[in-house]
Structure formats: structure tokens, C-alpha cells
Image (cartoon, helix red, strand yellow):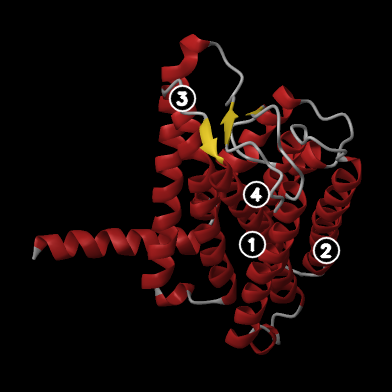
């Protein structure tokens, strides 16, 4: 990190909105944050307590819920502070570095997790008889560890490239979080080469993961179409539909923000809300409301708690 940096504090401008909307937006995003944390904690609890959910699919879902819970925690509290306090947008240089690293670490890990989950669904539907031997506990742990390690390395590259530049003038970040594109606009140096490296870095990760996911689902659809019974096809499609929904909600905004040349601050900030705030909220809702096994586990947990209270 460069010692030439004279900026000790950045100021986040937050979401573009009318001042009269401060309280409304604060209440809305606080509600989203609370529901996100509680929803993902509930999934972690249910999967932990129900032995029927100790399978590779739910092992990856546990990792995803954990990531989503912290992904939201990295972004929302600071956003709420910018809405309710005139000085709430202030963030120290080290805190900005930490937020950017955590944001890209958790975001890229989630990207890799979606890829691992699509591979898991591919094996489960295309090779049902060999699935249990192909996706053993050690294999799942290896894939999960790989997503976290790769995510940390990817984020380290983004953070190092962003903060190795000198920041000696403007310190107002046109965003509600510390992210690479708006921060690079404040650098007191030519950023074109670094912007290109970051563009390629994110592009390779995002497009590579998305391509693998698409290939997995093309193979899955081909396997589903070979299933003889309509009930079997319906169950297979339903299993994969949830994953497809959250994948699109995550990847489309990311591609829009990071992989287009004519980036606009205000538009990017609004679009970023979809994958930083809404996708972590959607994951527990989609995976519980569309999943019969999780709903059964929730019902058993509720009945068990009622029975315990009755005693």
C-alpha cells in the first residue's frame, strides 16, 4: 500500500435520494438487514439440527447462508449510518481498505459457491446412482475450501491494486460502500492500466463461473428430458429453479456494474443494491419457500419447540 497517500478519511455519499426519504430508507434497509440475518441464521440452524439435510446440497447451502449473512453485514450498517447521521458517511482509510477486501472476498466466494452448487446439482441429476460416491464429505469440504481460498486471493488482488495508488486530493466516494471503481476515480495517478487489470480479473472470474454454471445446467436439462415420468422431470426442474433464480439475481447486476465501459455512479449505486442487499435476502426465502425438505424441517423444528414448551 502506498505511503504517498495523504487521504486519511473518505466520505461515502450513500444512495442518491431526496433528504426527506432518509427515515423511510433507513427503516426499509434496516428491515431488509434484520430479515436477511434472521433468515440465514434460521437456515443454518435447521440444516444443523435436521439429519435429513446433512447432504452435499445443504452443505453448500450452509456455506452460502454464512456468506450472505456477512456479505450483508459488511455493507448495510455503514449504509444506515450514512442515512441517519450527517457525518455517518465518514470512513477511515484502513476501514475502507478492510471493507473493500471483505466485500470482494465474500462476493467472489459467493460466485464460486454458486458454481460449486451447480456442479453438485449436475452430478445429482445426471449420475444419481453414483452421486453419493462422487460427492463424499471430503470432496465437498475440498470444493468449499477452494471457494473460500480462491475468493480471498481474488479479493487480495483487487484490494492491492486499488490501494497501491496515491490518494492525495478528493476523498468523496460516490457510493454507499468502498468499492474499486468509485475509489479509483479519486486516485492522484493514471489508473487506466489498473482499471484494465481489475476489469480483466473480475471479467475472468464472473464470466468463467457463469459459463461453468450454464454448461452445468445445459447438461442438467438434457438429463432431465431423458427422465421418463413427468413427476420426476417436475421434481428435477423444481430443485434447480431455486438456484437459477438466485444466480441470475447475483450475476446480472455484477456484470452490469463491472463489465461495461460507460459506468455511471448513480446508476451503479442503485443497481448494486440488488446484489448486495436483496440477493442475500432472497437466498433464504427462495431456498425455503421452494424447497419441500427445508419446509418439513422447519415444521418439525416448530412442532418440537411447541412440544418442549408444553412440557
Label 3 – label 2 distance at C-alpha: 44 Å
Q: CA distance from mark 3 to mark 1?
A: 52 Å
In front: 15, or 129? 15
Residue topped by disc 3: 87
Where does the C terminus fall, quadrant-wise? bottom left
* Residue that numbered label 2 is attached to: 212
In front here: 157 or 75? 157
200 vs 24: above or below? below
Residue at x 75% of width, y 59% of height: 157
Among the two numbered marks 4 and 3 on one chain, the one whose residue lies closer to the N terminus: 3
Of mark 3 and mark 2, the one earlier in the sequence is: 3
Q: Position of residue 295 (x, y in %)?
A: 43, 58
Between label 3 and label 1, give the one nearer the viewer.
3
Q: Earlier in the sequence, mark 2 or mark 1?
A: 2
User: Residue 172 lies in what quarter of the image?
Assistant: top right
Q: CA distance from mark 4 to mark 3?
A: 35 Å
Disc sitting over residue 235 in the figure: 1
Residue found at the far left of this picture? 311
Q: Which residue is mark 4?
A: 246
Amino acid at each position: 500500500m502506498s505511503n504517498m497517500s495523504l487521504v486519511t478519511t473518505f466520505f461515502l455519499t450513500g444512495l442518491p435520494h431526496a433528504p426527506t426519504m432518509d427515515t423511510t430508507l433507513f427503516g426499509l434497509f434496516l428491515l431488509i438487514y434484520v430479515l436477511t440475518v434472521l433468515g440465514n441464521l434460521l437456515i443454518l440452524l435447521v440444516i444443523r439440527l435436521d439429519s435429513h439435510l446433512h447432504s452435499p446440497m445443504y452443505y453448500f447451502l450452509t456455506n452460502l447462508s454464512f456468506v450472505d449473512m456477512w456479505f450483508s453485514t459488511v455493507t448495510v450498517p455503514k449504509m444506515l449510518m450514512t442515512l441517519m447521521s450527517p457525518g455517518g458517511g465518514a470512513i477511515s482509510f484502513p476501514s475502507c481498505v478492510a471493507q473493500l477486501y471483505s466485500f470482494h472476498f465474500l462476493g467472489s466466494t459467493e460466485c464460486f459457491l454458486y458454481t460449486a452448487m451447480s456442479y453438485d446439482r449436475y452430478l445429482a441429476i445426471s449420475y444419481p446412482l453414483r452421486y453419493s460416491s462422487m460427492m463424499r464429505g471430503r470432496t465437498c469440504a475440498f470444493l468449499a475450501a477452494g471457494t473460500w481460498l480462491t475468493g480471498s486471493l481474488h479479493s487480495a488482488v483487487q484490494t492491492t491494486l486499488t490501494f497501491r495508488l496515491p490518494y492525495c486530493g478528493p476523498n468523496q466516494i460516490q457510493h454507499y460502500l468502498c468499492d474499486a471503481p468509485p475509489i479509483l476515480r479519486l486516485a492522484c495517478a493514471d489508473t487506466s492500466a489498473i482499471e484494465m487489470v481489475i476489469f480483466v480479473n473480475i471479467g475472468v472470474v464472473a464470466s468463467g463461473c457463469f459459463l461453468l454454471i450454464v454448461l452445468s445446467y445445459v447438461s442438467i436439462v438434457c438429463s432431465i428430458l431423458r427422465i421418463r415420468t413427468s413427476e420426476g422431470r417436475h421434481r428435477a426442474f423444481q430443485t434447480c429453479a431455486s438456484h437459477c433464480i438466485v444466480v441470475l439475481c447475483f450475476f446480472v447486476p455484477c456484470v452490469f456494474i463491472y463489465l461495461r465501459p460507460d459506468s455511471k455512479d448513480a446508476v451503479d449505486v442503485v443497481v448494486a443494491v440488488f446484489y448486495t442487499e436483496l440477493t442475500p435476502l432472497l437466498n433464504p426465502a427462495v431456498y425455503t419457500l421452494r424447497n419441500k425438505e427445508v419446509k418439513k424441517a422447519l415444521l418439525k423444528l416448530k412442532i418440537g419447540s411447541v412440544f418442549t414448551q408444553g412440557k
